[in-house]
Image (cartoon, grey):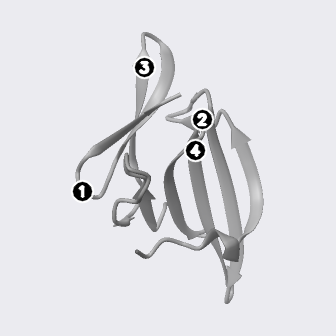
């Protein structure tokens, strides 16, 4: 599996109740890590909802979008990494955001509730 090794990166910043689609997701923690790679800075975002890691997304800070991403499966492993940014949909109860659905490289939607 070609996931980034987070112990090779330095913590950069953390957002609690991080936002997707401009809406804060209660309980979503976004942690960002960086490391120099030649003249560029590599970056990894790790997203967790409650105590469950949901996804990793990585690339370089000078790129507009994610280079790759991987989604955590229900058994606690990882779906294979895929190119580009993850496809994420908010799960709502009325107007309230209560979780996320993330599309894995297998085509499966992994749903995680706060």
Residue 112 placement (x, y as % from top left) = 44, 35
Contact between labelled residues 4 and 3, with CB atoms less than 8 Å apart: no
User: N-terminal of the two: label 2 or label 1?
Assistant: 2
> Which numbered dot is residue 48?
4
Residue 77 placement (x, y as % from top left) = 41, 58
User: N-terminal of the two: label 3 or label 2?
Assistant: 2
Q: Is residue 94 left or right of residue 25?
A: left
Along the line of sight, the residue nearer the viewer: 104 or 75 = 75
Q: Residues within 10 Å of mark 4 (few under 14, many from 20)?
A: many
Contact between labelled residues 1 and 2, with CB atoms less than 8 Å apart: no
Judged from this view, the residue extending furthest toward the front is 75
Contact between labelled residues 4 and 2, with CB atoms less than 8 Å apart: yes
Query: Is residue 93 depicted above or below 41 in this figure?
Result: above
Q: Residues within 10 Å of mark 3 (few under 14, many from 20)?
A: few
SS of the residue at dot 3?
Answer: strand
SS of the residue at dot 1?
Answer: loop
Residue at 53% over, 65% down: 58
SS of the residue at dot 4?
Answer: strand
Judged from this view, the residue extending furthest toward the top is 94
- C-alpha distance separating marks 2 and 1: 24 Å
Comparing labels 1 and 3, the label whose residue is closer to the camera? 1
Residue 37 placement (x, y as % from top left) = 66, 84
> Which numbered dot is residue 92?
3
Residue at 42% over, 60% down: 70
User: N-terminal of the two: label 1 or label 3?
Assistant: 3
> Which numbered dot is residue 50?
2
- C-alpha distance separating marks 4 and 1: 20 Å
| Residue annotated with mark 1 | 106
- C-alpha distance separating marks 2 and 4: 6 Å
Residue at 59% over, 73% down: 5
């Amino acid at each position: 599996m070609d996931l980034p090794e987070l112990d090779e990166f330095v913590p950069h910043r953390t957002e609690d109740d991080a936002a997707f689609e401009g809406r804060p997701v209660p309980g979503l923690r976004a942690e960002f890590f960086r490391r120099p790679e030649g003249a560029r800075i590599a970056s990894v975002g790790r997203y967790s909802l409650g105590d469950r890691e949901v996804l990793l997304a990585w690339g370089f800070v000078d790129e507009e979008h994610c280079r790759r991403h991987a989604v955590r499966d229900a058994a606690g492993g990882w779906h294979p990494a895929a190119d580009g940014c993850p496809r994420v949909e908010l799960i709502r109860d009325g107007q309230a955001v209560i979780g996320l659905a993330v599309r894995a490289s297998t085509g499966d939607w992994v749903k995680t509730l706060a």
